[in-house]
Amino acid sequence: MDRKIEKRTWNTKRILTILGITALVLLIAGAIYSTSGKSKLDVDTERLTISTITKGPFQENIPVNGVVMPLTTIYLDATDGGRVEQKYVEDGAILKAGDPIVRLSNTNLELSLANEQTQVVNDETQMAIQHNAAEQNTISKLNSMADVDVAYKEAARIYNLDKDLYGKKAIGLQEYQTAVNQYDYQLKREKLARQILIQDTTLVKQQEAQTKEQYSQMKQTLDLLKEKVSALTLRAPVDGQLTSFDSEIGQDKKAGDEIGQIDEASGFKIRVGVEDHYIARVFTGLKGDFQFADKTYNLVVKKVFTQVVAGQFNVDMTFVGPVPTGIRKGQTLQVRLFLSDQTTALLLPKGGFFQQTGGNWIFKVSEDGKKAYKVDIAINRQSPDYYELTSGLKEGDKVITSSYDTFGTIDELVLKK
């Protein structure tokens, strides 16, 4: 007898088909959900740095490296050059103004001084001879003038007497005319002698003035040579410490060669190097400070060097108030250079997040502390520890300030403890 075979509804083929369709639907649904919703990432809070937004005093400043330098440095060089004959001190010596440092010899300069001294002595002798000759000549002319004056006065006396006698018809015309002629002659002679004397006096004065001027110039030359020879012995111009002293006996120094320098014992300054993109914001009067032996010392910018070398320019800062005891030339210090006055602002602690966000956004922690999500922020100025926050967050908000390197493009963090 034939048996009716029932057709099975859930065979293996049908089950596999249904499972495949279901998996495909779930895959499509997951893809739609993942593209339409926010991407999330579970993060262990122990691997994060969570900071709180605070409000407090803010002063924009930058850290710069400073080197301690003498307040005043005077450079010593060989004015005329020469051979090192004697050293009186060694490098690092503490000197008083006028103390000898080194003596040079310069044969040519010393010979020039000797020749000039001889010439000055010869000129002094010649001047004395000329002066005596001029005086003798003047005396001779004065004697001649005296003789002429006596003869003139005698001729005038006779002329006046004969004139009166001639008027009275006591003498003849011939005798009277002789008196007139003699008087006229002596008068002309007296005028000529007086004119010669005046001219001689003027000429003598001019010659004496010229001689004195020439002698004065020679004396100036002699004095200059004496100063040059004296300068062959270099002396400390001020009280201070001798540094960079490089001279050995027998060594030749050319004119202008540096011998050393004197660091004046009047105090110190700090020379700091600042990155060139701050050059428009750094000027005299800006303040700064540094820590030394657990104390804070204040500085002020006194000079800005505008020349940029290797991306930096130099700034000289002087002390405001006390100078730390024990500070030494060449010592390196970490200085804070303030670029603004102190104000009250929202403070965002610095952290690794800035490298990925550029300060445009940050992960803000939710109030329940279970999630963190992106928020846009605006940052203005900065100090070594904080950013000045201008928008996007408020005081008391908590944010993640550690690095975002592993977050990729995640929009939301699920915080796991």
Image (cartoon, helix red, strand yellow):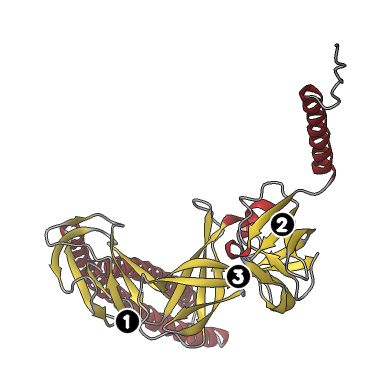
Q: Which residue is mark 3?
A: 385
Q: Amino acid at mark 3?
A: Asp
Marks 1/3 in contact by CB < 8 Å: the verdict is no
Relative vertical location of residue 46 with respect to residue 309 in this rendering, above or below? below
Quadrant (top left/top right/bottom left/bottom right) for the N terminus? top right
Quadrant (top left/top right/bottom left/bottom right) for the C terminus? bottom right
Q: Nearer the viewer, residue 66 or 190?
A: 66
Look at 58% across and 65% down and name the residue there.
46
Question: Looking at this rendering, what residue extends furthest in the top direction?
Answer: 1
Mark 1, residues whose alpha carbon is within 10 Å: few (<14), some, or many (≥20)?
Answer: some
Q: Which residue is mark 2?
A: 413
Marks 3/2 in contact by CB < 8 Å: the verdict is no
Where residue 84 sits in the image (x, y, percent)? 16, 62
Relative vertical location of residue 397 with respect to residue 320 in this rendering, above or below? above
The span from disc 2 to disc 1 (Cα, nearest Å) is 68 Å
The span from disc 1 to disc 3 (Cα, nearest Å) is 43 Å
Front tag of 1 and 3: 3
Task: Evaluate whether residue 205 shows in this view.
Answer: no
